[in-house]
Amino acid sequence: MVYCLDPKVTGNDRYLCFNLEGQCRLEVSPPEGFWVVGCRKSDLSLDCLSDLCNFFLKISPPKKYLQCLEVVNASSPFPWSYLMTEKDYRDYIQGVSDAARQALETCDTCYYKMVHRPSRSLLKSLDRAFIDQKFLSKVLKNPDLTEGQRSLLETFSPGSDGFAKKVKYNQFSSRTGRLVVEDGPRILTLRKDLRKVIRSRYDNGIIFQLDFKCLEARVALSSVGKQSEKDVYAQIENEVLDGSHSRDVSKVATLSALYGIGRRELSKRLKISFEVAGEILQKIHHHFEVAKVTERLVKESRELGHITNFFGRKLKSLESAPHVLYNNYVQSSGVDVSLLGFEKILRSVSGFKIHPIFVIHDALLVDCHPDCVKSLYDFAREGEEIPGIPGRFHLEIERIT
C-alpha cells in the first residue's frame, strides 16, 4: 500500500510519498509502483481507481480556504502551507492520506491494472487527425447542413499544420464506461458520411475503420462460456432458430433480447405475429442464458448496490430494472473488450506507419500508409483473443477515405 500526494495536493513542488510502514518522504517524481493522489494523468491514478470503484476520495482543502482562492483568483497548485494555519495544514494532509489509505484498502486494484490501464494507454496513444480542409469548407457552406452537424464539424477545424486537435475521451461520465468526447473533434456523433473530412497524412494513404463484428452478442455468449462463429447472427439463424428465419431476423431478434426489447415491439419491427415474436425471443433468451445471468445481477445489485461487468468493473445499479442490468453488463463488458482488443492490435503494428486517430465505441479509425495496408489486414484477419474472456473476437475492416 504505497502512495504519494501530487504537488497540487501538498501545495509545493514535490510529491509526498508514503511507504508500507506509513513513513513519508518528499520526492521529485513518484517512485515506481506508487499510486498518485490528485493527478488523473498518472499511470497509477488513485483518483481514477476511486471512480472505477464508486469510492468517494476526498482531497479538497477545507471550504474556507477554497473560498480564499476564489477571492484572489489563484490557480492550482497553490502553496497551502502558507495559506493555512499549521494545524489546519497538518489535518488536511493527514485527512488526504487517510482517505488514500482507505481507498486502497477498499478498492480492487486488479481491474484497474489489467483492464483500465491498457485502455488508457490506447486512448493516450491516439494521434491527431489530418483534415481535408476543402471538404470541410465546402460542407460548412452547405445550407442544408443542420446546426447540430455544423457544430460537430467545426470541432474538426485544423490548426496551421492541417491537423485537428487530439481527441480527449472521458471514461467515467457514462455508467457503463462507454466513451464520451471531453475535448477535441466530436467524432462519436458525427454523421458517417461526414467522416470524409478526415484525410490521410500520407500521399495515397487510407483511413480505415476497424470494427469488432457482432461485439455485444459475442460478449454475451462468451460470458456464459459459449463459443461463437465468425458470423454470430448466421450461427443463431441456423443453430437457435433452425433456419426458419433469415439472418436479418436473427440479428434484430438477438439485439432485441440483449437490449430488453419485448415481443410486442419485436413483432412490430419484424412485421410478424406476436406469438412468433415471443417464440423467437424465448429461444434466444434460452441460448444466451439471459434469465440465469439476470438473476445473478439482480441479487448482486440488491446486496451490494452495484453490479460488476465480466472483467470486474463496478457499475452503479440502484433502482435499475432487471433488463437494464443485463444490458449494462453486456455493454460495459463490450467496451472493455473493444479497448483491450484495439490496444493489443496497436502493439502488434507498432513500428508500422499506422496511426490510430479515433475510437468510435467498438470501432477504431486508423490512418495507414499505402505500404502498410497488407500488414494491417494480416494483423486483423485472425481476430483477437482478449485476456480473461473466452473466444476470438473477429474484426471487419472498412475503407473510409
Image (tube, rainbow, N blue to C red):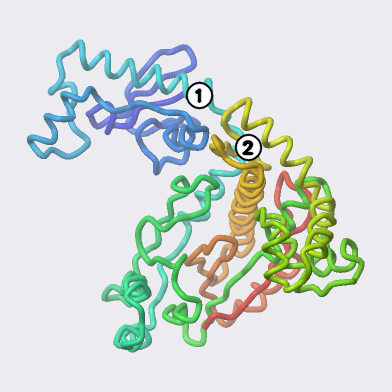
Inspect this view and state whether residue 384 appears. yes
Residue labelled with disc 2: 308
> Which label is found at residue 104?
1
Query: Amino acid type of disc 2?
Result: Thr
**Horizontal and vertical percent for residue 330?**
66, 50
Identify whether 6 is placed above or below 178: above
Nearest the camera: 338 or 25?
Answer: 338
Q: What element carries label 2?
A: strand
Dot placed on the residue nearer the N-terminal end, 1 or 2: 1
Question: Which residue: 67% across, 35% down?
Answer: 298
Is 114 above or below relative to 211?
A: above
- From this viewpoint, is residue 201 visible? no
Q: Which residue is drawn at 29% across and 87% down?
A: 141
Q: In the image, residue 37 lies at what x, y percent? A: 38, 30
Q: What residue type is labelled 1?
A: Leu
Judge from the rendering whether residue 365 lies leftward or rightward of residue 48; answer left or right: right
> Which tag is nearer the camera, tag 1 or tag 2?
2
